[in-house]
Every structure is written in C-alpha cells, then in structure tokens.
Amino acid sequence: MLKNVVNQNSEMTNKMPAKDEVLDKQLFEAAIDGCEKSRNHLFLRHYLPVHLYIKKALVSDADADDVTQETFLLAHRFLASFQGNSKFSSWIIGIAVNAVRNHFNRNYKFKNVHVNDDYLLDSICVHVNPERLLSAKQALKKVSAAVNSLDDIHREAFHLGIVKGLPKKEAYKLTDTTYQAFRNRLHKVRKFIRESVPEVA
C-alpha cells in the first residue's frame, strides 16, 4: 500500500535534517491523536530509507519487499510505544533491524547461525557502512554454500541437529550410526561452518 505511492517521494534521502525531525514529531503527535492522514504521511516519509536498508541487508528483492511490509505493519501496531527519546527514523530502522533478524531466524538455511548485530546495526547510523552490509550478505551466502557442499551424512547431521534442533540422543536414532559417531559428525559440521565462514561464527 505504501509502496504504491513511494515514487512520489523519490527525492527523499537517508539523512533527515533537523526541520524534518520537527515535522516527524508533529506528524507523530497528530497520528497518536487519531489522524490517519498524519500517520500515513509519517510512514511514507520513511518508507524509502527503510526499504533501501532492508534491500541492502537481504539478497532477494521479493524478501526485501515482504520484510519492508512487515516492518511497517509492526510500526503501525506499536506506534504508541514510541516515546520520543530518539529520532523517529532511528526507531523505525530499529524495527527494520529486528524484522531482518527475524527473517534470517525463519529461514532454515540460517537457523542457529549467529549473525553479528554489528552487521545489522551499522545502518542505523547516519553514515551507513555499505561495505559491512555487503560483507553480511556475502557471509550468509557463504553459509548456504558451505551447508550445500557437505556430503550426505554430514548434511543429515546438520539438518537433524541444527536445523531441526533435535537433542543428540534423539537425532542419532534417525541415522544409521551410533550416538558417539553422530556427535562427531555434528561437531565436524559446526567446525566446518566456523572455519568456512568465520565472520558469522
């Protein structure tokens, strides 16, 4: 819905002048008082920088669109929780950071693989660090590639012990090996991922 009119505001940039912060505050106060037009205007002003951040953090444009929509749905739902102690732009980017993290947590390829918050939080700063964001995207692609390069028995251990999160004493019974051998396989998988992609270990 917001995306349909974002092209009308293509001149918007990531840097919000002081006068824009004042306008944000005025729009927020009116939105809290029930003015739907002010709420829509407030969100529209921040759509482009939020969407650009999410597109830099994710590989797929379709995923970026979905996570952007999720961000603004959450912002709408929790708008009254904004206390005004920080910039509205920082608050809504913070929601985007959590939405991106949740996206990775929902994706089985990245489940139980820790992504350093520095990669996500860099974009909250006024001076976005595109090199760090690109590194994060590349690191996550490396994780996927590393998992796909495993042989069948180690990919099975990864799926049972990491993706599904089964206890080792249950997971090994679903394989053709012993408990100790399964533990060894899982240990090798984790070590392999840490060594292959140290930036997300």
Image (cartoon, helix red, strand yellow):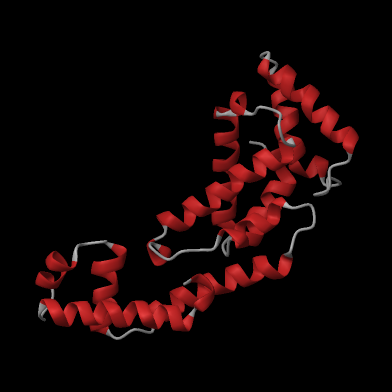
Quadrant holding the N terminus: top right
Determine the residue positioned at 60% across, 34% down.
75
Determine the residue positioned at 63% across, 72% down.
135
Relative vertical location of residue 151 with respect to residue 114 in this rendering, above or below = below
Residue 66 visible to the viewer = no
Q: Residue furthest front?
A: 85
Determine the residue positioned at 51% across, 63% down.
115
On screen, residue 48 versus residue 137, left or right, reads: right
Residue 7 visible to the viewer = yes
- Picture coordinates of residue 4, whole percent (x, y): 69, 40
- Picture coordinates of residue 187, whole percent (x, y): 29, 79
Relative vertical location of residue 124 with respect to residue 143 in this rendering, above or below = above
On screen, residue 25 versus residue 93, left or right, reads: right
- Picture coordinates of residue 60, whole percent (x, y): 56, 62
Determine the residue positioned at 56% across, 56% down.
62
Number of callouts: 0
Q: Residue furthest top?
A: 33
On screen, residue 101 versus residue 166, left or right, reads: right
- Picture coordinates of residue 183, whole percent (x, y): 20, 77
Q: Quadrant of residue 76?
A: top right
On screen, residue 163 versus residue 46, left or right, reads: left
